């Protein structure tokens, strides 16, 4: 679905519907207050809010202002997790599958300007083999012990199934609800539907504009950062030339932004963009023809109170901590983030690897779950939403699927998605899927990607606590990768660390061990030219489901969940301070 990010300008208006809404679990009588946008899960000290599986209901009244008479009015949801049904006065107006991408419903025929209606949002938090991300369906517990075959344990598991457990096959808390903004939007009836920009370093910008209606001419004007006209054109498709273009460079370079100002009849849309090129050449990743070295921790959308809720203040704080760390990138592990984050990264020069929510495809037989066409639809929507962001330099099809148990079958699944991403992206960015610690010599998928992203936990899950053995093993693997002649990013590596836990001897969970772990891994990375990136796991501690391996969540953050640096954050700050992008 193409749904341009809402704007307020001379022809478009938006009304933010954030605030306190009524909320309840389906079947309950009582409505409770819940803030929107935010995950509902941490807003009431009630275990049901964290654990209950099923449909939740939100409600509030909405009114279309009289002043919007004669305009095209839509309800726009930036994301509702995971599946949603939207009703006006009890009548369904739209439904949507998937919790991390926007959708909208036109209100024509449902509600007139000046009228009020009751808006209900049904949000389904259930995850299973048909959702992305994946929920388990009775197979191995995530970070728990199944003890398969023990009659009493099996009986307990059966009881859990009957009660409706909702267990993630992934390592982050299943936060849900209306987690991103909801808005009423108004545009002229003849409106701009979509904008696609493909810039090249020479200053040429290929553009294509989709409009609803064809009566009026389309005009496009490129403005530089000072608002001066840099180029003009007419028509729905064409090529413009920006003379002496200023390039969008990743931090610490200048992430210069232009704006494409598009008019169509009464409508106006302003699309920011950057002039930059991205390409893989041999074992190098080039941004504007210059080798780029990725260094920055992976993230989650996660914080106290808000859960996964969009929080502009948190985003700005986090990106400023990236600057403090001298980091230049992150991966949107493990789902597309809120649009506001990409806008911020465009502006701040932080490079993004944009990931679909295909995480958890490891237990059982993921390639028999019939996910292919839905997965492709999510990819279509993600690329369409994010295609114009200069900060996005690579697409990740998913995280840590099983690719080595049945390598051919896995390749059959991932290859078409890889091809689709290249076909769909007008800028034809490099494509990857992130590999887990596996039998890499059997795996056919990971090595077939444009850039090889590998998550490795030598010294943590493997060879725990023994950093000498960890280095030895990691070097042995890197020797193998060297022969594949591909650019490699160590896309996750880390050690759970309890802030404030120290030891004169660096043992697991201490801050000293986290530093020693990163020292050891960096030693191995620095020996290899074809390693073009290091992305520690994770930027900050984050919430997960309960389990014997998680003490109040995943503690691999360089920062605590409330963004206080651990020793390892200071260590990386020093390491990255003098590291060039190259
Ligand atoms: C991984 C996953 C990530 C986990 C991490 C961990 O490989 O990709 O989602 O949180 O390991 O800490 O175990």
Image (cartoon, rainbow, N blue to C red):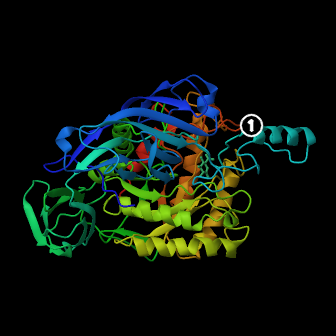
Q: Is residue 434 visible to the viewer in this orientation of the structure?
A: yes
Q: Residue at position x 19%, y 45% from top?
A: 69
Q: Is mark 1 within 8 Å of ligand 1?
A: no
Nearer to me, 356 or 118 = 118
Residue 288 x, y percent position in the rendering: 29, 69
Q: How many marks?
A: 1
Nearer to me, 391 or 292 = 391
Q: Is residue 545 above or below residue 410?
A: above
Q: Is residue 274 above or below residue 521?
A: below
Residue 269 x, y percent position in the rendering: 20, 57
Residue 342 x, y percent position in the rendering: 35, 51
Nearer to me, 15 or 51 = 15
Q: Is residue 424 left or right of residue 409?
A: left
Helix, strand or loop at disc 1? helix
Q: Is residue 542 visible to the viewer in this orientation of the structure?
A: no
Disc 1 residue crowd, few under 14, some 14–19, many 20+, Cα 10 Å: few
Q: Is residue 10 left or right of residue 555?
A: left
Q: Is residue 143 left or right of residue 186?
A: right
Split into 4 quadrants, where in the image is the N terminus?
bottom left
Q: Is residue 348 above or below residue 317?
A: below
Q: Residue at position x 90%, y 38% from top?
A: 152
Q: Residue at position x 51%, y 41% from top?
A: 122
Q: Which residue is mark 1?
A: 163
Q: Is residue 500 above or below residue 534?
A: above
Q: Residue furthest right?
A: 151
Nearer to me, 407 or 287 = 407
Q: Residue at position x 27%, y 46% from top?
A: 185
């Amino acid at each position: 679905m193409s749904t341009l990010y809402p704007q307020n300008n001379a022809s478009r208006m938006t009304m933010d519907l954030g605030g306190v809404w009524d909320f309840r679990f389906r079947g309950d009588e009582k409505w409770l207050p819940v803030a929107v946008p935010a995950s509902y899960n941490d807003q009431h000290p009630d275990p049901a809010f964290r654990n209950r599986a099923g449909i939740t209901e939100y409600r509030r009244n909405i009114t279309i202002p009289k002043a919007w008479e004669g305009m095209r009015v839509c309800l726009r949801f930036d994301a509702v997790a995971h599946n949603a049904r939207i009703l006006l006065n009890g009548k369904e107006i739209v439904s949507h599958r998937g919790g991390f991408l926007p959708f909208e419903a036109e209100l024509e025929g449902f509600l007139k300007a000046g009228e009020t209606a009751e808006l209900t949002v049904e949000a389904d938090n259930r995850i299973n083999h048909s959702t992305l991300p994946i929920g388990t369906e009775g197979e191995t517990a995530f970070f728990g012990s199944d003890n398969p075959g023990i009659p009493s344990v099996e009986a307990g598991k059966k009881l859990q199934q009957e009660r409706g457990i909702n267990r993630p096959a992934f390592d982050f808390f299943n936060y849900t609800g209306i987690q991103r903004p909801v808005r009423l939007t108004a545009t002229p009836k003849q409106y701009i539907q979509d904008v696609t920009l493909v810039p090249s370093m020479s200053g040429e910008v290929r553009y294509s504009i989709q409009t609803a209606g064809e009566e009026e001419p389309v005009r496009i004007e490129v403005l530089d950062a000072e608002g001066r006209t840099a180029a003009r054109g007419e028509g729905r498709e064409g090529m413009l030339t920006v003379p002496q273009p200023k390039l969008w460079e990743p931090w610490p370079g200048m992430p210069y932004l232009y704006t494409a100002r598009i008019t169509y009849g009464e409508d106006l849309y302003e699309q920011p963009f950057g002039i930059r090129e991205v390409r893989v050449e041999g074992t190098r990743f080039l941004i504007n023809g210059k080798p780029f070295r990725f260094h920055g921790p992976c993230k989650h959308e996660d914080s106290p109170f808000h859960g996964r809720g969009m929080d502009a203040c948190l985003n700005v704080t986090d990106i400023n901590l990236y600057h403090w760390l001298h980091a230049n990138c992150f991966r949107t592990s493990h789902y597309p983030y809120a649009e506001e984050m990409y806008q911020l990264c465009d502006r701040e020069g932080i490079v993004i690897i944009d990931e679909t929510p295909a995480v958890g495809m490891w237990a059982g037989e993921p390639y028999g779950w019939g996910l292919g066409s839905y997965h492709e639809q999510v990819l279509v929507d993600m690329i369409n939403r994010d295609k114009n962001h200069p900060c996005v330099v690579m697409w990740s099809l998913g995280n840590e699927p099983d690719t080595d148990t049945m390598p051919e079958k896995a390749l059959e699944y991932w290859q078409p998605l890889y091809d689709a991403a290249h076909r769909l992206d007008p800028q034809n960015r490099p494509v990857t899927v992130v590999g887990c610690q596996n039998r890499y010599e059997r795996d056919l998928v990971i090595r077939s990607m444009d850039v090889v992203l590998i998550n490795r936990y030598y010294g943590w899950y493997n060879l725990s606590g023994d950093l000498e053995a960890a280095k030895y093993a990691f070097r042995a693997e890197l020797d193998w990768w060297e022969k594949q002649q591909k650019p490699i990013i160590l896309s996750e590596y880390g050690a759970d660390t309890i802030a404030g836990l120290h030891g004169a001897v660096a043992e697991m969970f201490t801050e000293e061990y986290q530093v020693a772990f990163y020292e050891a891994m960096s030693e191995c990375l620095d020996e290899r030219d074809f390693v073009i990136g290091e992305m520690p796991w994770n930027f900050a501690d984050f919430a997960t489901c309960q389990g014997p391996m998680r003490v109040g969540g995943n503690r691999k953050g360089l920062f605590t969940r409330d963004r206080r640096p651990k020793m390892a954050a200071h260590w990386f700050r020093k390491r990255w301070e003098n590291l060039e992008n190259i």
